Image (cartoon, helix red, strand yellow):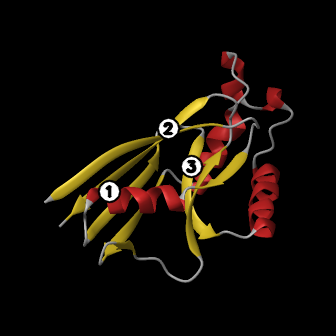
Amino acid sequence: MKHLRQELWFSTSHRRDYINITDEVERLVRESGVQNGLALVNAMHITASVYINDNESGLIQDYDDWLEQLAPHEPTAKYRHNRTGEDNADAHLKRQIMGREVVVAITDGNLDFGPWEQIFYAEFDGRRKKRVLVKIIGE
């Protein structure tokens, strides 16, 4: 069995950001030499997420608006977690909604997506360095 483990690092200039990482994951699949297997992609921080959806700017803005309605950043005093001196309780909740990871099948050396599917890194408490783990296994 072949395998590859790689970390992708991100440092966003905004508190919240959405980055399409599909090309980077596809590059790692090629580098791994795996023709048939699985690619695990997961955020290694509890205030970030990895998810799959359409790469359409309106949808990405809809996600951001929806998440901000569900777990608004302000007022920070309304969250018990922020009594610890943090101001990122909303980011933890947003991550819980959007999820930690995705697993994508690899078939004939390619990510086996449905129509329009792309992999995104979602940052909810940015402006510092964070990482995503990509683990590829297969034959």
Judge from the rendering whether residue 1 lies leftward or rightward of residue 108; answer left or right: left
* Mark 2 to mark 3 CA distance (whole Å): 10 Å
Please say whether residue 102 is visible from this viewpoint. no
Check disc 1 and report the residue beneath it: 31
Q: Which residue appears at 68% of the width and 37% of the height?
A: 12
Give the mark nearer the N terminus: 2 vs 3. Answer: 3
- Looking at the image, which is closer to me, 30 or 66? 30
Residue 103 rendering spot, x and y as whole percentages: 39, 63
Check disc 3 and report the residue beneath it: 49
Check disc 2 and report the residue beneath it: 131
Residue 40 rendering spot, x and y as whole percentages: 37, 56
Check disc 1 and report its element: helix, strand or loop.
helix
Q: Which residue appears at 37% of the width and 73% of the height?
A: 110
The residue at the far right in this view is 75
Q: Which residue appears at 80% of the width and 64% of the height?
A: 62
Which one is closest to the eye, mark 2 or mark 3?
A: 2
The residue at the far bottom in this view is 115
- Relative to 127, is 31 above or below? below
What label does residue 90 carry, if any?
none
Residue 95 rendering spot, x and y as whole percentages: 60, 47
